[in-house]
Image: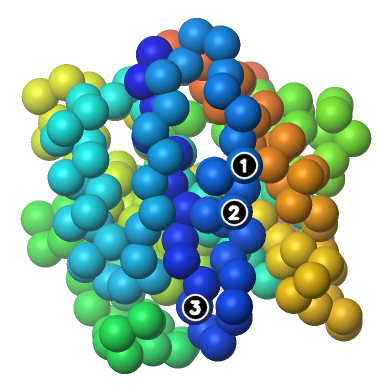
Amino acid sequence: MKIIVTGFDPFGGEKINPSIECVKALPEIEGVELFRVELPTVFKESAIRLNEVINDVKPDAVLSVGQAGGRAGITMERIAINVDDARIPDNISQQPIDEEIQVEGEAAYFSTLPIKRIVKAIREAGIPAEVSNTAGTFVCNHIMYQALFAATKAVKPFKAGFMHIPFIPEQTTDKPSLSLDKSTKALQIAIETIRDYLHDEDIKVQEGAIF
């Protein structure tokens, strides 16, 4: 099975982005040919790079990873929406406001990965995890949407989704954080779960939210 796993370069004045550090730290996984990709935290350019890799690799799945500073655990994103609305500029000072990501795309796309199975497996390893119903409107949502849009156009079908990870302790003193080792372990578990259940229905367990 071929799986593309992506992380982002640092943004917003940070010197490190734990998403790409986790991708780099991933061990080899039995039964999976991993393709690790660093994406720029840049609207459009990130998608161009990802689509180049998708066209070359023809993957079975794409799992993108991003930093969600302020969250306390691993969050598997349920949905990506067709809007860029940047609170801060990206890494080349672009700051789109209320712009469609794809004019021909749907209003939103749901993750096609087994996100509830992944959350369950990560929790069973003693790492906090939950389903998230918003990937934001910055480059993380942008790349999740672009990957799912690309999947609708691909000659060889593939599944796609997104994982957010917290700050690592070195980045903050007053916000939640998780060690790089634990975030990397969670990413490994996610990929193993994708390998094992990619073509199965996700489990139906309560992971909803009131707001």
- Distance CA(mark 1)–CA(mark 3): 20 Å
Which residue is at a point 83% across and 67% down the rendered structure image? 169
Q: Find residue 25 and name its label.
A: 1
Whether residue 209 sits left or right of residue 38 in the image: it is: right
1 or 3: mark nearer the eye = 1
The residue tagged with tag 3: helix, strand or loop? loop
Q: Between residue 70 and residue 21, name the one nearer to us.
A: 21
The secondary structure type at the circle numbered 1 is: helix
State the image coordinates of residue 4 (x, y, percent, origin top left). Answer: 38, 34
Mark 3 nearby-residue class (10 Å; few <14, some 14–19, many ≥20): some
Of mark 3 and mark 2, the one earlier in the sequence is: 3
Between 86 and 92, the one lying in front of the other is 92
Q: CA distance from mark 3 to mark 2?
A: 14 Å
Distance from label 1 to label 2 (Cα)?
6 Å
Residue 163's x, y, as percent? 56, 47
Q: Is residue 122 above or below residue 143?
A: above
**Picture layout, residue 78 above or below residue 95:** above
Q: Is label 3 or label 2 in front? A: 2
Question: In the rendered structure, which amino acid carries the disc numbered 1?
Answer: Ala
In the picture, the quarter occupied by the N terminus is: top left
User: Mark on residue 21?
Assistant: 2
Assess disc 1: are there few (<14), some (14-19) or many (≥20) residues with their C-alpha within 10 Å of its C-alpha: some
Q: Is residue 79 left or right of residue 76?
A: left
**Residue appearing at x 59%, y 78% in the figure:** 15
Horizontal and vertical percent position of residue 77: 54, 48
Q: Residue at x 14, y 35 (%)?
A: 55
Query: In the image, residue 111 lies at what x, y percent?
Result: 44, 39
Does residue 157 appear in this view? yes
Q: Do the residues under discs 1 and 2 have CB atoms within 8 angstroms?
A: yes
Residue holding disc 3: 11
The reply, left or right, for residue 141 in relation to residue 27 is: left
Q: Are marks 1 and 3 in contact (CB under 8 Å)?
A: no
